[in-house]
Amino acid sequence: MKRAVVLFSGGLDSTACLYWARKNYDEVIMLTVNYGSNEERVTNRVAEFFSKELDIPLKIIRLDFLEEFSKLRGTTLVGGETPKVTAKELEDMGFAREIAKSVWVPARNVVLIAIAASLLDALGGGDIIVGFNAEEGATFPDNTPEFVERVNEMLRYGTLSEVRVVAPLINLDKKGIAGLLKALNAKYEYSNSCYMPRGFTEDGKPIHCGECESCVRRHRGLIEGIGEDRTVYAVEPKI
């Protein structure tokens, strides 16, 4: 039996991974980790929506220490104000890397993968499904093929069961991910990419700010990838 744990953060990438895993594995578990981020309540509600929608069990784990360490570092994702950007500004890689530094949660992907690996080791093994992709890999070193390769080498020694990281989106940009979401018939409008979401519509769709880096990348990817964006925004993203 093929088993997978999907690290689910609520956005386009992890939503695509969830639908993909449901199609390719016999048993799927969603794992969402809380660490005091600005979008935490929205993320949890989104996770609960997709858990019910796809009939996939959900585990939500809180890490107080990661919230403490994030505040120690001064990441804007935890109790701060994330920068407002335009798509043109994100074309400047120097600027994009500075934005990435401002939202960096200390060793987050290392910590999340370790938790998922522990769960799978207890269950007898399986794959950890992550939403790492080429677009974010350009600014986040823990979204790269090299990171996946080295983590998998560590897991060979760190688990007794066979556990590995699988990154189905690793060679895709947001445009490609949008195409995959359409092919999988995913209800992406119920996902949340926003760093500073504004709540929900009456029918349960997250209201995105439309001005943070993640909103801009989301909107641009959907428009370029499938020619539409059913996301609800407080302000239309500038692309």
Image (cartoon, helix red, strand yellow):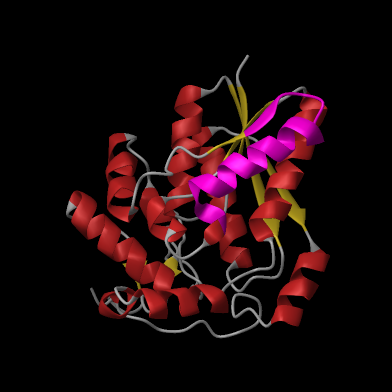
Residue 141 position (above or below residue 239): above
Residue at point 68%, 46% (across, down): 113
Question: Residue at left 66%, top 43%?
Answer: 151
Picture coordinates of residue 229, whole percent (x, y) = 26, 58
Residue 181 magenta-highlighted = no
Percent coordinates x, y for residue 87 in the rendering = 28, 74
| Residue 111 image position (x, y, % from top left) | 73, 54
Q: Is residue 192 above or below residue 196?
A: above
Q: Quadrant of residue 2?
A: top right
Q: For this view, does 118 lie left or right of residue 84?
A: right
Residue range in magenta is 142-164
Q: Quadrant of the N terminus?
A: top right
| Quadrant assignment for the C terminus | bottom left
Q: Is residue 155 magenta?
A: yes
Say which residue appears at 70% left-offset and 70% top-offset: 36
Disc tally is 0
Using the rendered view, name the quadrant where residue 210 is placed.
bottom left
Residue at x 21%, y 59% (from the top left corner): 223
